[in-house]
Image: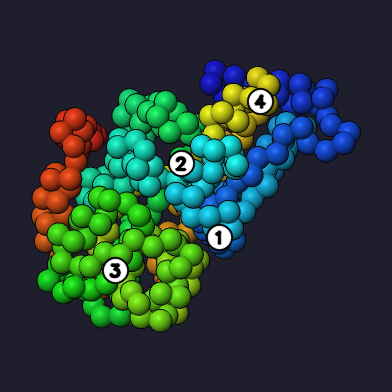
Amino acid sequence: MRIIRYIFIILLIICSSSCHKPDNGPEFILKFGHQANERDIWHRSAVYFASMVDSLSGGRVEVRIFPSEQLGGELDMIRSIRAGVAEMTITAESMQNWAGITAFLAVPYLIRDSDHLEIVVEGDIGRRIEQEMVRTIGLRPLCYFERGPRHLTSNRPVNTPEDLGGMVLRVPNVPLFVRVWQALGAKPTPMTFSEVFTALQQGTVEAQENPFALIYSAGFFEVQKYLNLTGHVTGWTYMVIGENKFSQLPRDLQLAVLEAGKATQEFHRREFEEQEEYLRVRLQNLGMVFTEPDTEAFRAKAEAAVLEFIPEQYRSLYYEILRSGNN
């Protein structure tokens, strides 16, 4: 029944849109900026979304994509959307600057694996997070993308927290990340993603941490030797649209955008599952040396910093997520 209903909605959107196909260009333009470059799965997913919106809206809505932080970094994009200057982006834990609950999109050593992530995001916890995003930040999630585990890259091997030894480490502008890496012994330095390659190349920072996909697409293998499999964060990110812009769309176009989001999530899921193992092999073939650190040592130090950082009102949610999927 769900499949039949899904097909019916799509047919209804197409039928409605075809009756209003514009003669002089699109009625609505959505500027979609994100941080990844054109090789990355996020960009390919954004392109897929744009094509689905064009098809489902009958050309009445055009999505214009700006990769590689052309419209600014992640925080810049959130501010631009809130100000009505842009309409869409891909964002995650940086939203905690406005809504603390979104920190749970990337808490070190909280989400165990893909199955656990799906239970959290598609269940009641995920719905609560999404509602808070709309209410507090004015961002409406259209779909979520699983992110591969974040790993540490460096030019010297890191097997224990002690190996960090004051290492200057680029992190995104996420307060929790800064606090955790300080507790682990590094010197975390917040920096926009577009600046990281040059900073590593020039030696102003010594290390960075990201999933395989961004390590590969950004070419960090050219300026980092070791890929230390810390696996310190398994999380997700949202493709979002500004709630103000979304509310301005006619109902049929809102449905078109929502359905395009659902289709994009499935597109990303298929792509993601295929690429993780490929990227691991590819990065090794490109010369990166993989290490297998003592993850329990990292976990113990990270958890203490996380619990110290999380506000009291979110402690119960932390434990709720930690226990979920264990029944």
> Contact, CB < 8 Å: mark 2 with mark 3?
no
Q: Earlier in the sequence, mark 2 or mark 4?
A: 2
Residue position for label 4 = 249
The quarter of the rendered structure image containing the N terminus is top right
Residue position for label 1 = 68
Q: Nearer the viewer, mark 1 or mark 2?
A: 1
Q: CA distance from mark 1 to mark 3?
A: 21 Å
Q: Which secondary structure, mark 4?
A: loop
Q: Earlier in the sequence, mark 1 or mark 2?
A: 1
**Place of residue 137 in the rendered image (x, y in percent of width and height, measured from the top left):** 43, 33
Label 4, residues with CA under 10 Å away: few <14, some 14-19, many ≥20: some
Amino acid type at circle 2 is Tyr
Q: Residue furthest right?
A: 23
Residue position for label 2 = 238
Q: Residue at x 54, y 38 (%)?
A: 83
193 and 121: which is toward the camera: 193
The answer to whether 263 appears left or right of 58 in the picture is left
Q: Residue at x 34, y 26 (%)?
A: 128
Q: Which secondary structure, mark 2?
A: strand
Q: Quadrant of residue 60?
A: top right
15 and 126: which is toward the camera: 126
Q: CA distance from mark 4 to mark 1?
A: 27 Å
Amino acid type at circle 4 is Leu
Q: Earlier in the sequence, mark 1 or mark 3?
A: 1
Q: CA distance from mark 2 to mark 4?
A: 20 Å
Q: Which secondary structure, mark 3?
A: strand
**Place of residue 302 in the rendered image (x, y in percent of width and height, measured from the top left):** 16, 54
Amino acid type at circle 1 is Ser
